[in-house]
Image: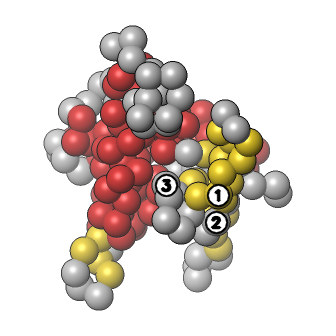
Amino acid sequence: MTPLLMSPQDVGEVLWNAGFGKNHPIDTFIDTIRVTFAESQAPDCYIATYTGYKRVGSGGFKCCDAHTTFTNVNGTVDRGLMQVNSSWTSLSDLDAMDPVKCANYAYTNIFLPRETKAKGTGLTAWSSYTKQIDQVEARYLQYFIEGMVGAVDSWAKRKGRPYVGGGGPGGA
């Protein structure tokens, strides 16, 4: 399947609209963006800018590939932007590859029930949030910049100040 590359701003917007941002504290929203990057980061990508395409990946912001899949040792497959496991059979493979449908499903069926049951546990379904690398830190913690840019940009759009992280009109 052709990659569907998404910038931190794109990811922030999709996750905000799914409910991760607008219904929860900013730190939860930032962590959700960080988990998303840890789960589905593209190794190297280009994003469109006002002057053409700009390489990102090493030295710049990372991108997510919303069409990524990962086959686990038990044969199940993690799919799409939020890497929803195929054991969640009510999410079709086709819908898992749609970043909006995948994020909405992940929020409604995975994150929200956990968060409602025990505050602060909504992201524990994702291994990048819970597993540690070399017993030092969970993998999602490596994506601080992407989390901040995605969250701030989404918040700023609601305040009438778009593109704060993107270098577009009004941006740096």
Q: What element carries label 1?
A: strand
Q: Which residue occupies 40% across, 56% down?
A: 35
Q: Nearer the viewer, residue 139 or 109?
A: 139
Q: Where in the figure is residue 99, as x and y percent of width and height? A: 62, 40
Q: How far apart are marks 3 and 1 (CA)?
A: 9 Å
Q: Which residue occupies 45% across, 63% down?
A: 38
- In the rendered structure, which amino acid carries the disc numbered 1? Arg
Q: Which residue occupies 66% across, 51% down?
A: 54
- In the rendered structure, which amino acid carries the disc numbered 3? Phe
Q: Mark 3 = which residue?
A: 61
Q: Residue 55 carries which label?
A: 1
Q: Distance between the residues labelled 2 and 1?
A: 8 Å
76 left or right of 105 in image: right
Q: Do the residues labelled 2 and 1 touch (CB within 8 Å)?
A: yes
Question: Tag 3: Cα neighbours inside 10 Å, few (<14), some, or many (≥20)?
Answer: some
Q: Please tell me whether residue 75 is drawn above or below residue 156 in the rendered image.
A: below
Q: Mark 2 = which residue?
A: 44
